[in-house]
Image (cartoon, helix red, strand yellow):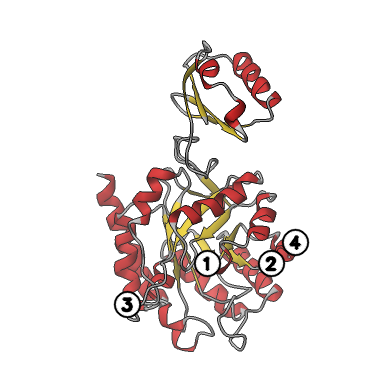
Amino acid sequence: MIAVLRNGVTKDQMDNLITWLRSQNIDVHISQGAYQTVLGLIGDTTKIDIDLLSGLDIVESVMRVTEPFKSANRKFHPDDTVVTVGEGENAVKIGGGNFAIIAGPCSVESEEQIITVAKAVKASGATLLRGGAFKPRTSPYDFQGLRAEGLELLTKAKEATGLPIVTEIMNADHIPLFENVDLIQVGARNMQNFELLKELGRQKKPILLKRGLAATIKELLMSAEYIMAGGNENVILCERGIRSYDTYTRNVLDLSAIPVLRGLTHLPIIVDPSHATGVAKLVKPMAMAATAAGADGLIIEVHNDPKNALCDGAQSLTPEQFDDVSKRVSEIRKILAK
């Protein structure tokens, strides 16, 4: 249920209403926009008399929300959420018209490799650095990442370039290791790892939540709800393709998810054309298409030597290729701004 307050409501009036609602064991999510204040009522709202609530002088309208996701719902929060990643002069805003490009290798392999790539992608317009330290792999015999050492190397790359770092978490027990990570990524395989999502909901760091291999849009939003219900509202959604029967691409990039999600949620939406296609030459057109479709950002795999990459070399761009993609995306954004 949501209650839209009238313009001119005083803080004391709003506080009194919120106190009464909470006395009914209802949690209240407050969204104060430029023109109106929306109270999102979370809990067993069947006990709330909708006629009584709508009849109050300070209430403009009341409606029930039928979707199971509440905190992530645009009805609860009409304005776009802007998530800030990092601190100080290197902080990056994503959402609400703020566009970000996250770039870097699938896996951190060495200090030289990650710093070389970090400097290259920054020079080409990337605003955040990605790199896998803990790698979920289909085969137990594939490279699993440098783990804690990989996180240390990412920190060194951050110190060398100033880029906030993005890396994937696989286990809630690893959270203490992520102290220097600016944006914690939840991969497709863990999108419905609900115990992990609950723990991340207790954190203050922003979370990048990737859509599962066969997850519906509703399931993606419900996973975001798990994080937000714990108190962490800094969630960024990522469309990274869904599994299909075709073999020409790794997955099928669902670009229609961008406008669909835009209507359903206030959370920022970015796109991963690297994992979606699995083919380096397809990353550029899909990155451009995602930008034109209204994404708030991109996450792209870049490696200084893709042929010898320990992970996902086939979908990784060279720094030169990434530079071209970044320029094309910038041109599209200029057109969209007109």
Q: Which residue is mark 2?
A: 171
Per the image, label 1 sits on a secondary structure element best described as: helix
Residue 91 seen anywhere in this rendered image of the structure: no
| Residue visible at 58% across and 30% down in the picture | 46
The extreme front residue here reads 46
Residue 281 is tagged as 3
* Label 3 or label 1, whichever comes before in sequence order: 1
**Up-down relation of residue 135 to residue 175 (above or below):** below
Q: Which residue is mark 1?
A: 188
Q: Which residue is mark 4?
A: 176
* Residue 216 picture location, percent across and down: 44, 59
Residues at marks 3 and 1, CA–CA distance in whole angstroms? 23 Å
* Residue 270 picture location, percent across and down: 43, 57
Residues at marks 3 and 4, CA–CA distance in whole angstroms? 38 Å
Residue type at numbered disc 4: Pro
- Pointer 3: residues within 10 angstroms few (<14), some, or many (20+)? some
Residue 47 vs residue 6, the one in the foreground: 47
Is residue 259 rendered to the left or right of residue 310?
left
Disc 3, disc 1: CB below 8 Å?
A: no
- Pointer 1: residues within 10 angstroms few (<14), some, or many (20+)? many
The C terminus sits in image quarter: top left
Residues at marks 2 and 1, CA–CA distance in whole angstroms? 14 Å
Residues at marks 4 and 1, CA–CA distance in whole angstroms? 22 Å
| Residue visible at 50% across and 35% down in the picture | 76
| Residue visible at 51% across and 10% down in the picture | 57
Per the image, label 4 sits on a secondary structure element best described as: helix
